[in-house]
Image: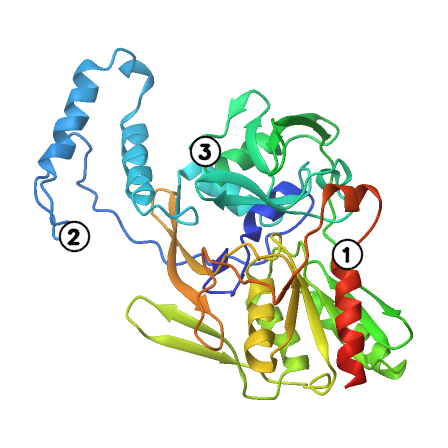
Amino acid sequence: MFFKNKKLTFPILIAIILAGGIFYLGFKTGFGRKVPDDINISAPMATSTLLNADLSVFWEAVKAVKDKYYNIKDVTDEDILYGAIKGVLGSLDDPYSTFFSPSDSQKFSEDLNGNFGGVGMEIGIQKNQLVVIAPLKNNPAEKIGLKAGDKILKINATSTTDMDVYAAVKLIRGEVGTEVRLSIFRDGWKEPKEFKIIRANVVVPTLDWEMKDGDVAYVQLYNFNSNAPSLFYQAALSALLQGAKGVVLDLRNDPGGYLDVAVNIAGWFSNRGEVIVREDFRSGEQNVIRANGPSALVNLPVVVLINGGSASASEILAGALQDNRGTKLIGEKTFGKGSVQEVENFRDGSSVKISIAEWLTPKGRHINKKGIDPDIEVKFSDDDSINKKDPQLDKALEIIKQEIAK
């Protein structure tokens, strides 16, 4: 998810939670708005300057619950209040706008630097279904065979119907060495399958690279974290010194990271001043973010590999190269995460995270809920994985060789 303050782009907040042993890469604390001291959940309040609605209906519902619910002794006024706020956020039909009770908000903040067991994958909501956005390389979820786009139907014995990502996170993570069971359905399967995964401390990889066919730099970027700029610098410099004539940039299963990192890496392939991404607010105002160099790879042909696990920062980078350079994108449609979140903390320790803007490509294309289509679609099947084949990379190498030969 994109955080406005530190420009964290991914839905990756969730990936970080699930990965275990990782940091959240950025977070906007916001400014707590004070709640009037005299508000009591039992006090009628029929009018409001914020809502053009009859709030007496709300209070009538609260009264009915408190008067008639059979197990009201186990329900506090705070439970009712926080449930109502969750309903407000739920009315937005936006999986990235969320309410945190004081206890959840504290856990959320602790997770910024917390160590815990997880399975090493990014999850999110797509078409009202909890899905795997991207399994992280060499971590439990990937090793056991989970893939981008897998639908998570159950966590242990709990159905994920109407479950938000944070509730799912609580169930999936746990002590290192313990087991979590996921019921998974994948397109093409006739029925769900159960995966038993042992939780571990997960380390998120950042970047690998190698020279292929003598003159092609193949760069796999797994995460747009704070280490990525320096690692990309080292890879790019080494590749140029080794005579690279073209670049294959692999963004498959890269769920995002810092926006600034995406802009930094885009700057290697772009002229200074070129638009990389547009931040679009509901007022119609746009904040245009431009490349600031170093432009060292601007004259080298490049192709980009994408799939359903490419999200947020990956989509920003892929979209910018496609718009500005006509770079060919090869693989499968990206995830479609392009919104900006801001977090506000309240006086009682609770908080809300609200989507406040969208990211658009340089030419104004919407990413959020749409994704980016490849120029050349190449599927990656289960059989390819079993047989250790990579038709997407094979196609990318074929295309980059054609580009180099021009």
Q: Residues within 10 Å of mark 2 (few under 14, many from 20)?
A: few
Q: Residue 152: horizontal and vertical position, in percent?
A: 57, 34
**Could you tell me which quadrant the C terminus lies in?**
bottom right
Quarter assignment of residue 162: top left
Question: Between marks 3 and 2, how big is the CA–CA gap?
Answer: 29 Å
Q: Is residue 291 above or below residue 210?
A: below
Q: Residue 369: horizontal and vertical position, in percent?
A: 45, 55
Looking at the rendered structure, the kind of residue marked 3 is: Met
The reply to whether residue 43 is visible in this rendering is no
Q: Residue 375: horizontal and vertical position, in percent?
A: 61, 67
Residue 50 is labelled as 2
On the image, numbered disc 1 is attached to which residue? 391
Q: Is residue 65 above or below residue 318?
A: above
Is 213 placed left or right of 289 in the picture?
A: right
Is 245 placed left or right of 271 in the picture?
A: right
Question: Between marks 1 and 2, how big is the CA–CA gap?
Answer: 55 Å
Q: Residue 148: horizontal and vertical position, in percent?
A: 63, 46
Q: Which residue corresponds to the image point at 73% horizontal and 41% vertical from the top-left? A: 382
Quarter assignment of residue 189: top right
For marks 3 and 1, the one nearer the N-term is 3
